[in-house]
């Protein structure tokens, strides 16, 4: 996760297009990564996770890619829908533990 | 299925007052987490419990904050005395535990200290 501030990075996509949300992490000891979606007025919702011994994992319409060499994580959403509009957070756990560090988040806008 | 339940959803109080936030984790989950979310600092882990025992409270801002988990189905986060800078959304999350580190969040308590 990176430092946070008042302004979230924003991604605006057309309905039906694919979305790619990126995240950089800094701790080489991170061994588990999670993507969460947060809608207005709600708590973060688990989307998909990946362990450090994998480089790709697919779910329903979502794919997470992990590049440990450059400490980069991405979330791909296929055929983005208006209901996908939300803030997306990447999060990392270190050394098999439960302590979770969240990134700053990216706001996704889906245009109809 | 009942998710993580937090109460109250909103709280407005004057500075100096004691504030108590409550959380009921998902039944069967072994780990419980308290987070604070602000525009400036994002989501910060305050403390987490495993099997009702506090494991890491390094994120607790100062002595005015305390958290307890008297049993597997209930936890509280207290702020005494409260200050305006404590205004934030406080989230509770629970996790199944061993082998599954995904966290399930409640909908939060929006706290405003005047």
Image (cartoon, rainbow, N blue to C red):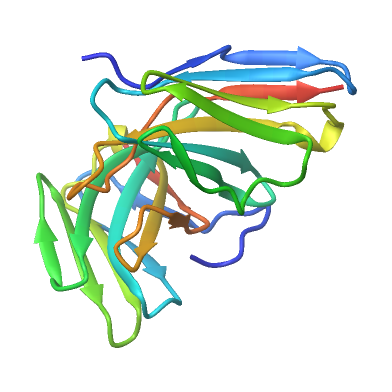
* Residue B107 visible in the snapshot: no
Q: Nearer the viewer, residue B54 or A102?
A: B54
Q: Position of residue B82 (x, y in %)?
A: 82, 27
Q: Which residue is rendered at x = 15% and y = 73% of the image?
A: A53
Q: Nearer the viewer, residue A28 or A58?
A: A28
Q: Quadrant of the N terminus of chain B?
A: top left
Name the one closer to the observer, B77 or A110: B77
Vertically, is B1 above or below B64?
Answer: above
Q: Quadrant of residue A43?
A: top left
Name above or below for residue B6 compared with residue A21: above
Residue B78 visible in image: yes
Looking at the picture, how far across and down is residue B89, in whole percent? 61, 31
- Residue B51 placement: quadrant: top left
Give the image location of residue A40, x and y in percent.
48, 29
Drawn side of residue A90 relative to residue B18, left or right: left
Residue at left 85%, top 17%? B17
């Amino acid at each position: 996760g990176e430092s946070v501030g008042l302004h979230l990075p924003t991604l605006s996509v057309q309905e039906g297009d694919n979305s790619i949300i990126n995240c950089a992490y800094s701790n080489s000891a991170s061994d588990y990564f999670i993507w969460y979606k947060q809608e207005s007025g709600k708590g973060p919702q688990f989307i998909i996770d990946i362990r450090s011994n994998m480089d790709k994992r697919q779910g329903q319409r979502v794919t997470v890619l992990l590049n440990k060499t450059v400490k980069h994580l991405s979330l791909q959403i296929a055929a983005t829908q208006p209901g996908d509009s939300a803030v997306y957070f990447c999060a990392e756990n270190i050394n098999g533990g439960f302590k979770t560090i969240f990134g700053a988040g990216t706001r996704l806008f889906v245009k109809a | 299925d009942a998710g993580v339940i937090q109460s109250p959803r909103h709280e407005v109080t004057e500075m100096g007052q004691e504030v108590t936030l409550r959380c009921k984790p998902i039944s069967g989950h072994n780990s419980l987490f308290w987070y604070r979310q602000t525009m400036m600092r994002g989501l910060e882990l305050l403390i987490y419990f495993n099997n009702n025992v506090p494991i890491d409270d390094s994120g607790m801002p100062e002595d005015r904050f305390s958290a307890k988990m008297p049993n597997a189905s209930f936890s509280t986060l207290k702020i005494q005395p409260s200050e305006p800078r404590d205004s934030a959304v406080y989230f509770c999350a629970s996790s199944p535990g061993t082998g599954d580190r995904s966290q399930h969040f409640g909908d939060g308590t929006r706290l405003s200290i005047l």
